[in-house]
Amino acid sequence: MIISITQPALNWFKREMALEKGDSLRFFVRVGGCSTVQDGFSLGMTVETPTEPALSTEEEGITFYVEEKDIWFFEELDFTVKYSRKKDEIVFQHGE
């Protein structure tokens, strides 16, 4: 299981969330919404220091991660964060 951030998504995070080297962004499970992985749940994002990271990657000095308590959501699937130019938003893609 890996987490990947595309370059367009990284650029979006730096622009829209003012992320810079040394920052950490957590992906977490939210009740409600929709996803392609778990019915009734969706992903949220917050700038936060990791406490028990189970999955992480670093791009240009920015850490993107999922805490141990939220790893169940991914069901051992790879997780890619992309930017949709059409929607002007971040999209999450899950796959094996």
Image: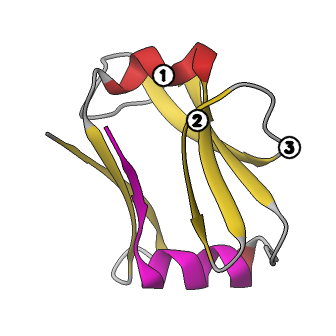
Question: Judging from the image, what secondary structure is the residue with disc 1 in?
Answer: helix
Which stretch is magenta? 1-15
Circle 3 packing at 10 Å, graded few (<14), some (14-19), many (20+), is: some
Question: Judging from the image, what secondary structure is the residue with disc 2 in?
Answer: strand
Residues at marks 2 and 1 touching, judged by CB atoms closer than 8 Å: yes
Of residues 83 and 7, which is closer to you in this image? 7
Which residue sits at x=65%, y=80%?
Answer: 60
Mark 2 to mark 1 CA distance (whole Å): 7 Å
Which residue sits at x=14%, y=39%?
Answer: 96
Of residues 17 and 24, which is closer to you in this image? 24
**What residue does disc 3 label?**
49
Going by the picture, which residue comes out furthest to the left?
Answer: 96
Q: Position of residue 80 (x, y in %)?
A: 34, 56
Q: Amino acid at mark 2?
A: Val
Of residues 37 and 85, which is closer to you in this image? 37
Q: Position of residue 10 (x, y in %)?
A: 56, 77
Residue 52 located within the stretch drawn in magenta:
no
Of residues 39 and 82, which is closer to you in this image? 82
Circle 2 packing at 10 Å, graded few (<14), some (14-19), many (20+), is: many
> Residue 66, labelled with which disc?
2
Q: Is residue 22 above or below residue 65?
A: below
